Image (cartoon, coloured by chain):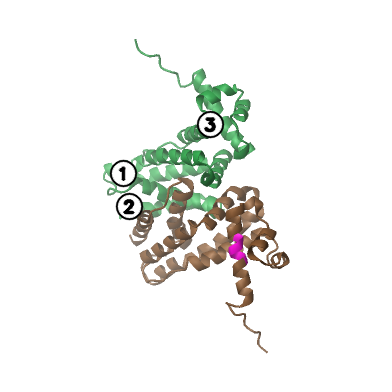
Chain colours: A green, B brown
Amino acid sequence: MSEPRRRPGGRSAQVRAAVLEAGLAELASAGYHNLSLEGVARRAGVNKTTLYRRWGTREALLLDAIRARATARVPIPDTGDLREDLLALVRAAIANLTTAEVQAMVRASIALSPHDDTLAAAGRAFWAERLAVDAEVVHRAVARGEIAPVDAEQVIEAVLGPPYFHLLVTGRPVADDFLVGTVDLVVSGLRR
Amino acid sequence: MSEPRRRPGGRSAQVRAAVLEAGLAELASAGYHNLSLEGVARRAGVNKTTLYRRWGTREALLLDAIRARATARVPIPDTGDLREDLLALVRAAIANLTTAEVQAMVRASIALSPHDDTLAAAGRAFWAERLAVDAEVVHRAVARGEIAPVDAEQVIEAVLGPPYFHLLVTGRPVADDFLVGTVDLVVSGLRR
């Protein structure tokens, strides 16, 4: 007998999605220091024991939430062209970063990670996974002979790093021109 | 009659340097929320009215402190070669960023800027000045015909952005290989 497939839109998946969205919303409105699984449960209209059983800590819940958000909003493009793929990826990543919820999460994580090992570990886990996924567009460009073999994750950081720096460190909004200029510079280097 | 020149190593410059170092040290140990001009005055062994008269706010003092630190520790290289200049610049910038004082300042500023207009304005002012100064190495490469005309500040952000992202966002230490790889990718793109 085969296992029944869990439907993606089933009750359990719906509750999970509602909780994860509530986690990001609660973080953005209450701040990390005031974030609790109780608060998230209240916002999602779910019993708090469900959250404790499933996630255990607020850091585990936030890691799942930011991962689900990135998976939904930053799909991995496959246009057959490295420049187009990187541009689509970085545009989606920066659109996601500039939502109130993700920006609150990233800014809090940067400030608090040095003082909170659990949060720091969640952040490292997220980025280890996410850079490996993003790197797929570079591996495909190498496989089809568009560019020579290269450190694929370093290429992803070369296109994501400047707009993150621009927004979070220099404090300026990221215009589309900036993303195009960043990607063009990196792709020129790779196609040399 | 000519104005007497203020000696760089004179009493006034010494007090100023001591206060600015005390400001960064106090930020790193007390945290931004607990930072006050009184605390900085106490740490520097200076009367607090001197600080109020000269800087007025903690944000003005921190802006001056971070500017003095960057000027002292991140000199603008001029080796006659763009790759060498960018590498020296980014190595010095990341060495400065990874000191406890500067890292505390940058992490606090990223977290608090959305909620603190004075701090946000100080951060933007610092980076507007600093990117213009850093861009000098790119302007010189264009002037000597090493590369075609280019948006010089975008080049600086293309080499500073990835290591900032690596350290602050992905949460990993920045190895020298990473800096070399980043600079090589950008310089390859410019020399195409």
Marks 1/3 in contact by CB < 8 Å: the verdict is no
Dominant secondary structure (helix, strand or loop) of the stretch shown in magenta: helix
Marks 2/1 in contact by CB < 8 Å: the verdict is yes
Q: Is residue B1 magenta?
A: no
Query: Are labels 3 and 2 assigned to the same chain?
Result: yes
Q: Quick one: A130 or A49, which is closer to the camera?
A: A49
Query: Are labels 1 and 3 assigned to the same chain?
Result: yes
Could you tell me which residue is drawn at 35 percent across and 40 percent down?
A136
Disc with the residue nearer the chain's start (1 vs 3): 3
Q: Which residues are magenta?
A: B19-23
Chain of the residue displaying label 2: A
Disc 3 or disc 2, which is closer to the eye? Answer: 3
Which amino acid, by three-letter code, is at mark 2?
A: Leu
Which amino acid, by three-letter code, is at mark 1?
A: Ala
**Horizontal placement of B81 versus B47: left or right?**
left
User: Whole-Å distance between the Cαs marked 1 and 3?
Assistant: 39 Å
Q: Mark 1 sits on what residue?
A: A141
Q: Please, which residue is most extreme toward the top here?
A: A1
Q: Mark 2 sits on what residue?
A: A190
Q: Mark 3 sits on what residue?
A: A57
**Horizontal placement of A147 versus A72: left or right?**
left
